[in-house]
Image (cartoon, rainbow, N blue to C red):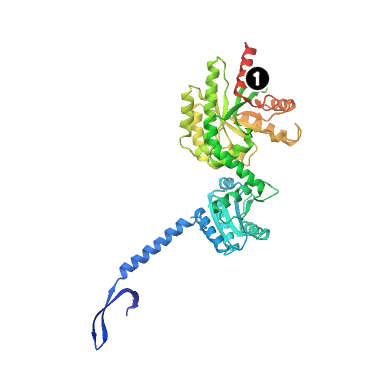
């Protein structure tokens, strides 16, 4: 056996005691006892055990907040539910509205402080009531007893914890709730369902939480069907490119176009882009789809030239996820070189979310592509939270103005004044402007009067298949001829 003894000098030593019976005298066994000093080896064992515990902690916990990480949260929650078979529990997932913007405006230090305050709040208000963890970034998950009062208590504690943060932007938390009915379901899937509910209220000023229900369940099934069929749809060329013309507001002449995607499903017919595009952005398939659309556009431009038609520049989307790919610029350049197209024939549209997600790589990619000859457009300018702040850093060539400024106002009121100011600002910065979503003659004439160069919308032309777009260009050539 290993035991510890204190020496006369008060020092502690580890000894290994071994006893061996070697004879008997008058029926009494006599043992030979040997004590071996094993202090050094024992201390090494304890040190190894301590290091193992530290490593295990690092593997199971989030480095910043000390909360369980995703894998540990899922495992501990599964154990917790087994240990509490009688109670009813909710899986709650929540995150911070525009957390990346907070990091951008106030720095990562402020972002980290907010995350730490949330972690402290969870530890105070839950303790042994349930489990909680940080899944990634600003995404947190909680398993707690079912009931609106329990969730309300957590929400109040989160608000209380964050009340000490003194920044101009209000910190809003959004919650998604899934009531656990099937204990055999994986915790990961429970989190996914809570997250699906969460996504329905993100950005909603009237509601801060939503509960997963049968309607959302149907959305899950539909999304699963999309997941099961998207790769095959790409191989079978079910995704079609539609073109929406862009006109010169002074002459009415078609000068460029935007490439849009439509899914012509063999059984469901045309699937709405408003349904599958956000889903593909969420699951990452948008990267493959965007690359496919860009190649289809190059093919079409080449075909137009073979038919002797004067092709016009076409803008294509570059999703925010693509800017994480270090080979993005090379792949776009290689594509146009393979089809022997001038870079100016394929314009690249970005959104402000690409900048707020990954500003350094976006700016580096833009510089490389613009130096090569590509023009970059910023889509839906004015609809986002930090457009003006972003514009000082992002040297785009063309702004696409959001027509929401004219919604329900016609051409009177403050919206048109803001739109006119944006056009003037763009001119001073050396940028051209395209107003998209024009639906009336009055809107088009107003935009022309304030100096906007180009327009796009149903008033001029709806998105059309490639054949119809070719016919439009042929008619344009005949008029010129």
Across and down, in percent, residue 97 comes to 62, 48
Residue at 40%, 61% in the rendered image: 52
Q: Is residue 480 left or right of residue 15?
A: right
Q: Is residue 14 left or right of residue 385?
A: left
The N terminus is located in which quarter? bottom left
Can you say whether 227 is above or below 306 in the image?
below
Can you say whether 248 is above or below 4 in the image?
above
Across and down, in percent, residue 456 comes to 66, 27
Q: Is residue 81 left or right of residue 402?
A: left
Across and down, in percent, residue 421 comes to 68, 33
Query: Tag 1, which secondary structure?
Result: loop
Closest to the observer, 460 or 303: 303
Closest to the observer, 441 or 309: 309
Closest to the observer, 324 or 396: 324
The C terminus is located in which quarter? top right
Q: Is residue 372 left or right of residue 151?
A: left
Q: Residues within 10 Å of mark 1 (few under 14, many from 20)?
A: few
Residue denoted by label 1: 253
Can you say whether 14 is above or below 241 in the image?
below
Can you say whether 197 is above or below 149 in the image?
above
Quarter holding residue 35:
bottom left
Q: Residue most toward the top?
A: 481
Q: Residue most toward the bottom?
A: 26
Label count reads: 1
Closest to the observer, 77 or 169: 77
Quarter holding residue 179:
bottom right
Residue at 30%, 71% in the rendered image: 38
Across and down, in percent, residue 345 comes to 54, 23
Q: Is residue 171 in sight in this rendering? A: no
Q: Is residue 437 in sight in this rendering? A: yes
């Amino acid at each position: 056996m290993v035991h510890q003894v204190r020496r006369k000098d008060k020092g502690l030593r580890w000894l290994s005691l071994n006893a061996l019976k070697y004879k008997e005298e008058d029926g009494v066994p006599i043992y030979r006892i040997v004590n071996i000093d094993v202090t050094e080896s024992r201390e090494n064992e304890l040190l190894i055990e301590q290091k193992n515990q530290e490593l295990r902690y690092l593997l199971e916990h989030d480095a910043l907040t000390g909360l369980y990480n995703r894998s540990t949260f899922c495992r501990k929650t599964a154990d917790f539910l087994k240990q509490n078979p009688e109670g009813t529990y909710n899986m709650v997932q929540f995150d911070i509205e525009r957390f990346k913007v907070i990091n951008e405006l106030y720095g990562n230090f402020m972002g980290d402080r907010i995350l730490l305050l949330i972690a402290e709040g969870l530890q105070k208000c839950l303790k042994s009531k349930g489990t909680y963890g940080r899944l990634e970034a600003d995404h947190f998950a909680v398993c707690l007893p079912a009931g609106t009062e329990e969730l309300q208590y957590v929400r109040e504690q989160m608000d209380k914890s964050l009340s000490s943060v003194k920044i101009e932007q209000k910190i809003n938390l959004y919650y998604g709730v899934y009531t656990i009915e099937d204990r055999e379901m994986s915790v990961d899937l429970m989190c996914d369902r809570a997250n699906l509910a969460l996504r329905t209220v993100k950005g909603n000023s009237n509601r801060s939480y939503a509960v997963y229900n049968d309607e959302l369940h149907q959305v899950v099934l539909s999304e699963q069907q999309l997941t099961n069929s998207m790769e095959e749809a790409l191989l079978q060329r079910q995704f079609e490119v539609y073109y929406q013309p862009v006109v010169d507001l002074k002459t009415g002449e078609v000068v460029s176009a935007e490439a849009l995607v439509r899914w012509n499903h063999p059984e469901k017919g045309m699937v709405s882009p408003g349904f599958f595009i956000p889903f593909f952005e969420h699951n990452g398939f948008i990267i493959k789809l965007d690359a496919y659309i860009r190649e289809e556009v190059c093919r079409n431009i080449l075909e137009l030239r073979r038919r002797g038609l004067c092709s016009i520049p076409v803008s294509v989307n570059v999703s925010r996820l693509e800017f994480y790919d270090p080979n993005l610029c090379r792949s776009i350049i290689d594509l146009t070189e393979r089809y022997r197209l001038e870079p100016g024939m394929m314009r690249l549209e970005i959104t402000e979310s690409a900048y707020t997600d990954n500003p350094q790589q976006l700016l580096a990619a833009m510089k490389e592509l613009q130096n090569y000859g590509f023009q970059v457009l910023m889509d839906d300018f004015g609809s986002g939270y930090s457009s003006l702040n972003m514009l000082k850093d992002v040297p785009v060539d063309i702004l696409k103005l959001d027509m929401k400024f004219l919604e329900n106002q016609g051409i009177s009121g403050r919206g048109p004044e803001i739109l006119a100011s944006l056009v003037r600002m763009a001119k001073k910065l050396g940028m051209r402007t395209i107003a998209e979503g024009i639906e009336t003659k009055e809107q088009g004439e107003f935009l022309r009067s304030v100096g906007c160069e180009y327009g796009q919308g149903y008033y001029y032309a709806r998105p059309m298949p490639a054949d119809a777009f070719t016919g439009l260009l042929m008619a344009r050539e005949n008029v010129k001829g």
